[in-house]
Structure formats: structure tokens, C-alpha cells
Image (spheres, helix red, strand yellow):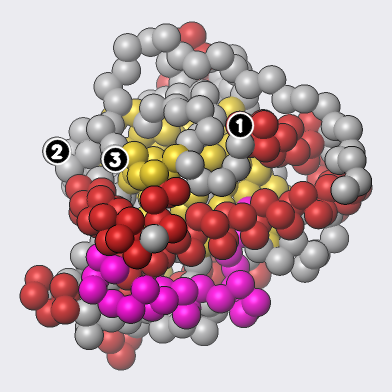
């Protein structure tokens, strides 16, 4: 086996010592999903986590701490070791294509009161060879491919099996509409938040990314130590997500809500200024965003015995349901660029592909 290319080591901020109001989230031991009996037990835990918070941790996901550290070393390369000129060469065309592939550079999204984001990310399709990458990443294609496949087959697929069991559907129900080789936009994202000025913090009430739900099926976040992610708890309060070494943070998105007839709810989450002892540090993230295949019509699995007992909550009539490509493209084109209508409740709303979408400040 050939040696891996030597790259700079990324040193993250130390974990916060502030007393924060953390969300109480379930911890799912994915190693127990290897047997039918283990999957049945885990399916109940995942179902309850989805129904209560829509967020949960995953441990024993198959990557060692050493492997995860290497991923964060790789994750920093597109930001710290690529020139601005080369970044522009690989800049994404979100507004035109409805796809996140490539760079989203800083100040692309409007946050509030004329303030734009200080977030950079680099997005890679699940099939990592679909596009050319910046020069610094080219010797690492095999590692990126391994990471993409690991997220897809060793994390996403077991979780999709558990979600299907939770609806008393065949285990492969969701796998059939998340096929690795079919046309779709499931993707890796490396993301870096940069510190902001006091004026920017004041104008946005310290919000770095507005409260929102993800549009896909599942989002996999590789836990990192800078506290900034908050989830809206069932009681309506914003609570912090705690960092756990070598754990994943998983949340559901709108597509899973549509497919499950509202049984699995997408959770509202946001990103805010870190606590005082972490301010001034950048926040580097590694993600995998899963979406259904582009040709999937996002209608509920009405044959689910669970849905037949509990009822189906529809956001639209079945005949009006968007196709995945239409839904994903509409959400990406609109995010941070459209002008939603402000409501009396302090939220912002817009209609995308016939679906009412709400943003929370």
C-alpha cells in the first residue's frame, strides 16, 4: 500500500470551557447495526431521536480518530493552500445551476441588515471524479473517494435502513432511492467560518447562519470543537450542540419529512458566534449531505403501517410533489440570494417549488 501524501496538519481550537445550555441528544452506536436484532433495537432509538429532536450523535462509525484527524487536515487545504485566483477558477454556479459543486466563496449569502456571510466552502460530488479539483487536492483523490464512499455506504446506508425499519417498511426502501451510481447531488462539503467584525455581529444579533432546515434527506456532520451550532429544541429554545471527539452529528432534512409523511421531522438549526473563549478562531467543518436521486418524486410512503396508524401530514398534494432535482435546485438558487417575506412572528417565508419555506432569526 502506497504512503499517503504528506500535507500540513490542521490544529483546531481547544474545546470551549464555557457553561452552555446543550441539547440532550441520543447517542447511536452504529456498530450495533451489523445484526438484524441490533438494527431493530437501534431503529427504535433513531426513530425516537428523529421524533424528539431530529438530531442525534453517531459513534463507532468505522473511522478511527487518526483517520478523522487526517480528514480535517485535508479539509483545510482548499482554504489555506489555494490562492484566491485558483478558487475563482473553481467557483460554483449556484444561482445558474442549482448545484453547490465547487467553491462558495465568502460574502455570497446575505445574512441580515446588509451583512453578508464570512463562510467559505468547497463542495465535491459523491462521485469525486465528476469534476476537476484544485491542484492541492489532486494527489488526494483516492482519499476523498474513500471518505465519500465511507459516508455513503458505512454511515448513510445503515441509517437509512434504520429509518425504514422505524416505518415498518422493507430495510432497503430508502436505499433504492439513494443509489450511489445514479444521477444525484449527494456531496461532501469542507466548510470554513472566519471570525467577523463587532459591527457584523451587532447587525446580525450574532447569527452567522439563519435558522433553517436542510433540504435533503440526511446531513452528516463530523464533530469539531468550535461551538457555534444550535438546534431549536421542542420547547422552542435554541440549545448548543456539544462536541464529542470522533463522533458524527446527524440531522434530517425536508426530503425525509416529505417521504415519511411528516413522521420524521426536519429540525431547525442555526450557526451563531462561538462562546467568548473560542472567538477569533476559524471553524472548520467536514460534512456529507445526502439527497435522494434526482428523479425521485418526494411523496410519502403511504404503504407504511406506521403512517397508516399515525396519519400522514402533507405539505402539498401528492400530484404537486416536487422531483428531487427541482426541489434541490430551487432551494440552492434561492438560499441567501432571494428576498423572503418577513412575518409578524419574526420569521421569513418564501415559496419554492410549491412548498412554503421558513427561515428563522
Distance between the Cα atoms at labels 2 and 3?
Answer: 17 Å
What is the distance, in whole Å, between disc 2 and disc 1 at their CAs?
34 Å
Residue 127 in view (yes/no): yes
- Note whether 91 is above or below 57 in the view shown: below
Q: Which mark is residue 65?
A: 1
Instruction: Report crowding for label 2: few under 14, some 14 to 19, many 20 or more residues within 10 A (C-alpha).
Output: few
Residue 257 lies, in percent from the top left, at 30, 66
Q: Which marked residue is nearer to the observer: mark 3 or mark 1?
A: 1
Number of callouts: 3
**Can residue 186 be found in the magenta stretch?**
yes
Q: Is residue 118 left or right of residue 330?
A: right
Principal SS element in the magenta part?
A: loop
The reply, left or right, for residue 89 in relation to residue 40 is right
- Residue topped by disc 2: 235
x, y percentage for residue 358?
31, 55
Q: What residue appears at the point 17 percent right and 42 percent down from the top-left corner?
A: 234
Where are the magenta residues, as a range?
165-188
Query: Label 3, on which residue?
Result: 26
**How far, Cα to Cα, is label 3 from label 1?**
21 Å
Q: Secondary structure at mark 2?
A: loop
Compare marks 2 and 1 and give the one earlier in the sequence.
1
Residue in the foreground of this view, choosing between 124 and 182: 182
Q: Is residue 76 magenta?
A: no
Nearer the observer, 210 or 184? 184
Amino acid at each position: 500500500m502506497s504512503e499517503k501524501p504528506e500535507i500540513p496538519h490542521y490544529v483546531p481550537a481547544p474545546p470551549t470551557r464555557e457553561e452552555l445550555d446543550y441539547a440532550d441528544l441520543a447517542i447511536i452506536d452504529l456498530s450495533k447495526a451489523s445484526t438484524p436484532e441490533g438494527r431493530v433495537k437501534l431503529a427504535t432509538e433513531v426513530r425516537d431521536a428523529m421524533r424528539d429532536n431530529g438530531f442525534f450523535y453517531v459513534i463507532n462509525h468505522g473511522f478511527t480518530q487518526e483517520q478523522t484527524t487526517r480528514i480535517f487536515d485535508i479539509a483545510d487545504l482548499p482554504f489555506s493552500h489555494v490562492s484566491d485566483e485558483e478558487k475563482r477558477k473553481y467557483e460554483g454556479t449556484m444561482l445558474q445551476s442549482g448545484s453547490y459543486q465547487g467553491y462558495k466563496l465568502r460574502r455570497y449569502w446575505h445574512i441580515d441588515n446588509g451583512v453578508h456571510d464570512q463562510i467559505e466552502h468547497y463542495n465535491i460530488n459523491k462521485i469525486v471524479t465528476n469534476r476537476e479539483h484544485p491542484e492541492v487536492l489532486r494527489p488526494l483523490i483516492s482519499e476523498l473517494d474513500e471518505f465519500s464512499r465511507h459516508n455513503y455506504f458505512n454511515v448513510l446506508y445503515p441509517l437509512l435502513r434504520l429509518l425504514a425499519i422505524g416505518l415498518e417498511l422493507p430495510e432497503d426502501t430508502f436505499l433504492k432511492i439513494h443509489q450511489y451510481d445514479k444521477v444525484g447531488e449527494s456531496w461532501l462539503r469542507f466548510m470554513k467560518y472566519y471570525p467577523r467584525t463587532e459591527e457584523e455581529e451587532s447587525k446580525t444579533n450574532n447569527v452567522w447562519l439563519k435558522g433553517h432546515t436542510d433540504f435533503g434527506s440526511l446531513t452528516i456532520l463530523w464533530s469539531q470543537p468550535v461551538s457555534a451550532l444550535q438546534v431549536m429544541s421542542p420547547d422552542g429554545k435554541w440549545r448548543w450542540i456539544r462536541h464529542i471527539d470522533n463522533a458524527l452529528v446527524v440531522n434530517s432534512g425536508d426530503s425525509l419529512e416529505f417521504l415519511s409523511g411528516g413522521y420524521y421531522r426536519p429540525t431547525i438549526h442555526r450557526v451563531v458566534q462561538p462562546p467568548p473563549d473560542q472567538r477569533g478562531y476559524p471553524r472548520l467543518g467536514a460534512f456529507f449531505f445526502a439527497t435522494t436521486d434526482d428523479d425521485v418524486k418526494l411523496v410519502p410512503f403511504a404503504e407504511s403501517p406506521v403512517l397508516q396508524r399515525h396519519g400522514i401530514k402533507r405539505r402539498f398534494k401528492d400530484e404537486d410533489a416536487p422531483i428531487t432535482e427541482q426541489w434541490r435546485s430551487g432551494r440552492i438558487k434561492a438560499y441567501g440570494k432571494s428576498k423572503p417575506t418577513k412575518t409578524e412572528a419574526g420569521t421569513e417565508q418564501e415559496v419554492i417549488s410549491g412548498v412554503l419555506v421558513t427561515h428563522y432569526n
